């Protein structure tokens, strides 16, 4: 290839080098095809420990991105044409170079789909335009156990598939509130096996093209190890997991979103308190069991109603999540409460969404304290915020 076009190529590849440095967490591969006459010579590179394991002409080397780019540029001078492909999760850059021209093309890409693989029977799913689409998200759906190895949504996982897709639908409405010019850092408190966080990672990174990172916290080493294994299988390097108590977590970066999904009883309060203390832009909670206020609250005008245990329990659930929402408002969040899934599937179906919008609301705090006195309760969230 002539020197003039090799120099042009060098400019493009310098941009590739910068992109790798910025986006190494979502880098997937590099492929190079040199042509000389009718002959082709192929090179392939994959991520390994911050570098690229590159094979060309039967030789495998572990190279820095700078060393690989320089190697490609030197080799190009010996051939007539070059096709260079740089792949990230959901995105690809293709550079075609020959003696006439050097051209760069960007394109969105989906997961590789096996055309011989049977697709899900749509008649067994909801009549909706899914956010997490069968075909495009097959690798993810298989890894989290929603899809079988032959490409079908498992019959006993259809409900779960609909739930995770509705979760993304509810999250979609707050995406515009996330930072536009920096990596969005998301903290999952009491993450468990992190299925929904893996789905959110896929959607933000590969569908919405938002640069993001995830931290998962859970007391159980077993579930943390399981999450690490899934992240490794999916090549989701923008995720980290720690077996630790939520209250012991000290972030080393600004946390934009705090999530708590099905954390039991006061673990939800601990997550909400952490989100408030970190001044997180967004806090999302799907509470699980409610036990704390049930043993505390007492309201004389309702004594004849609360003598029925089922009523007292249901009212405790409402009071717990209602006071959580009120505290978030007191701390300057705009709060909405929605049904996450149908109450026919589970009575624990509430999602609390809080967006930081203003300074603290003294009137809301006064109302919260008044409720504490009226109901004779001392909620864990109030305790965590004041005594953590």
Image: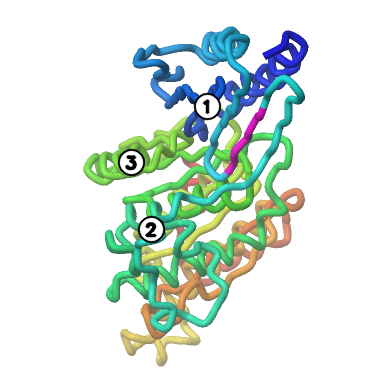
In the picture, measured across the screen, residue 274 lies left or right of residue 279, that is left
Residue located 56% across and 22% down the image: 37
Q: Nearer the viewer, residue 29 or 162?
A: 29
| Closest to the observer, 222 or 69 | 69
Q: Which mark is residue 233?
A: 3
Q: Which residues are magenta?
A: 91-96
Earlier in the chain: of badge 1 and badge 2, it is: 1
Query: Residue 28 in the image: x percent, y percent?
Result: 48, 34
Give yes or no for contact between labels 3 and 2 (Cβ–Cβ under 8 Å).
no
Q: Residue at x 63, y 34 (%)?
A: 94
Q: Position of residue 67 (x, y in %)?
A: 53, 9
Marking on residue 135: none
Q: Position of residue 351 (x, y in %)?
A: 52, 67
How would you rate the neighbour count of disc 2 (Cα within 10 Å): few for under 14, some for 14-19, many for 20 or more? many
Q: Residue at x 52, y 82 (%)?
A: 127
| Type of colouring | rainbow
Give the mark nearest the N terminus, 3 or 2.
2
Residue 245, image x and y in percent? 35, 39
Q: Which residue is mark 1?
A: 38
- The span from disc 3 to disc 2 (Cα, nearest Å) is 12 Å
Q: In screen coordinates, is 78 left or right of 123?
A: right
Q: Is residue 256 left or right of residue 140?
A: right
Q: Any mark on residue 141, and which?
A: 2
Q: Quadrant of residue 58?
A: top left
Instruction: Pick out the residue farthest to the bottom.
Output: 304
Q: Is residue 215 above or below residue 263?
A: above
Numbered disc 2: secondary structure: helix
Residue 89 in the magenta stretch? The answer is: no
* Residue 295 is at least partly visible in this image: no
Residue at coordinates 41% horizontally, 60% vertically from top-left? 115
Q: Is residue 146 above or below residue 94?
A: below
Instruction: Please say if 234 is above or below 117.
Output: above
């Amino acid at each position: 290839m002539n020197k003039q076009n090799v120099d042009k190529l060098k400019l493009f590849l310098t941009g590739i080098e910068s992109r790798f440095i910025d986006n190494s967490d979502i880098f997937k591969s590099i492929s190079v095809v040199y042509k000389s006459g009718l002959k082709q010579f192929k090179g392939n590179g994959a991520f390994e420990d911050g570098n690229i394991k590159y094979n060309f002409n039967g030789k495998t080397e572990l190279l820095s991105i700078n060393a690989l780019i320089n190697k490609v540029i030197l080799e190009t001078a010996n051939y007539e044409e070059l096709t260079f492909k740089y792949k990230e999760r959901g995105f690809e850059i293709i550079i075609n170079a020959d003696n006439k021209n050097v051209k760069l093309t960007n394109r969105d890409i989906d997961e590789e789909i096996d055309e011989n693989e049977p697709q899900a029977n749509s008649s067994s799913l909801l009549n909706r335009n899914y956010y997490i689409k069968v075909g495009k998200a097959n690798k993810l759906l298989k890894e989290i156990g929603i899809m079988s190895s032959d490409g079908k949504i498992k019959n006993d996982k259809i409900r779960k598939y609909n739930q995770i897709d509705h979760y993304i639908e509810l999250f979609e409405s707050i995406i515009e509130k996330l930072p536009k010019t920096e990596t969005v850092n998301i903290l999952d408190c009491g993450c468990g096996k992190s299925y929904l966080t893996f789905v959110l990672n896929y959607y933000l990174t590969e569908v919405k093209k938002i640069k993001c990172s995830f931290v998962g916290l859970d007391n159980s080493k077993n579930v943390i190890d399981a999450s690490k294994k899934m992240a490794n299988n999916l090549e989701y390097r923008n995720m980290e997991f720690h077996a630790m108590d939520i209250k012991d977590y000290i972030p080393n970066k600004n946390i934009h979103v705090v999530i708590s999904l099905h954390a039991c009883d006061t673990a939800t309060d601990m997550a909400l308190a952490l989100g408030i203390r970190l001044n997180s832009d967004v806090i999302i909670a799907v509470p699980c069991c409610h036990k704390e206020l049930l043993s505390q609250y007492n309201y004389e005008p309702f004594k004849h109603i609360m003598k029925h245990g089922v009523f007292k329990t249901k009212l405790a659930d409402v009071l717990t999540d209602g006071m959580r929402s009120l505290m978030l408002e007191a701390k300057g969040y705009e709060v909405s409460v929605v049904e996450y899934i149908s109450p026919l599937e589970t009575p624990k179906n509430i999602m609390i969404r809080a967006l930081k919008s203003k300074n603290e609301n003294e009137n809301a705090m006064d109302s919260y304290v008044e409720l504490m006195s009226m109901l004779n309760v001392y909620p864990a969230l109030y305790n965590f915020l004041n005594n953590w």
